[in-house]
Amino acid sequence: MSQSQKRGAADDIDELRLEDKIRHHLTSSGKREDLKELLAARLAACGWRDDIKQRCREYVARKGRETVTTEDIVRAVRPEGRARVPDSVKAELLAEIKKFILSI
């Protein structure tokens, strides 16, 4: 393994450790739950939740109630659901995360 490969691997490990530390601080401080509540509130307020519920219902109706599993629904709806999260909601959540990281 070359020196640059070793350095790249070490950087990856350091980045993982930083990610783990941030995740730990988010969880232990209660901020993770606050962010989840903020996200849920914003998604409900903009109609995203209702839209996703409707898409799930439509998927179940197409596939048949007896044959579809929860995993099937999630697999089918998740990509579009993620793509439909409004940019304003993403930006607000990202700003909150950045503010938290800068405070630790």
Image (cartoon, rainbow, N blue to C red):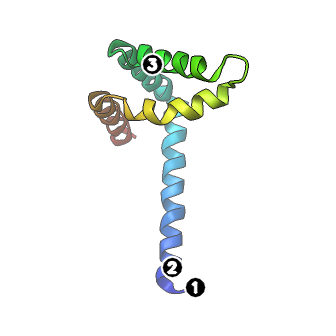
Q: Position of residue 17 (x, y in %)?
A: 54, 55
Name the residue at 33% across, 39% down. Answer: 98
Mark 1, other Cα within 10 Å: few <14 / some 14–19 / many ≥20: few
- Screen quadrant of the C terminus: top left
Secondary structure category for the residue under label 3: helix
As measured in the structure, the alpha-carbon distance from the residue carrying label 2 to the one carrying label 1 is 6 Å
The reply to whether discs 3 and 2 touch (Cβ–Cβ < 8 Å) is no
- The reply, left or right, for residue 15 in relation to residue 90 is right
Residue toward you, 69 or 64: 64
Is 55 or 33 nearer to us in this picture?
Answer: 55
Determine which residue is flagged by label 3: 37
User: As displayed, is residue 80 above or below residue 12?
Assistant: above
Whole-angstrom CA distance, mark 3 to mark 2, is: 41 Å
Instruction: Tell me the amino acid under the disc marked 3.
Output: Glu
In the rendered view, tell whether residue 29 sits above or below residue 37.
below
State the residue position of label 1: 1
Residue 12: horizontal and vertical position, in percent?
Answer: 50, 64
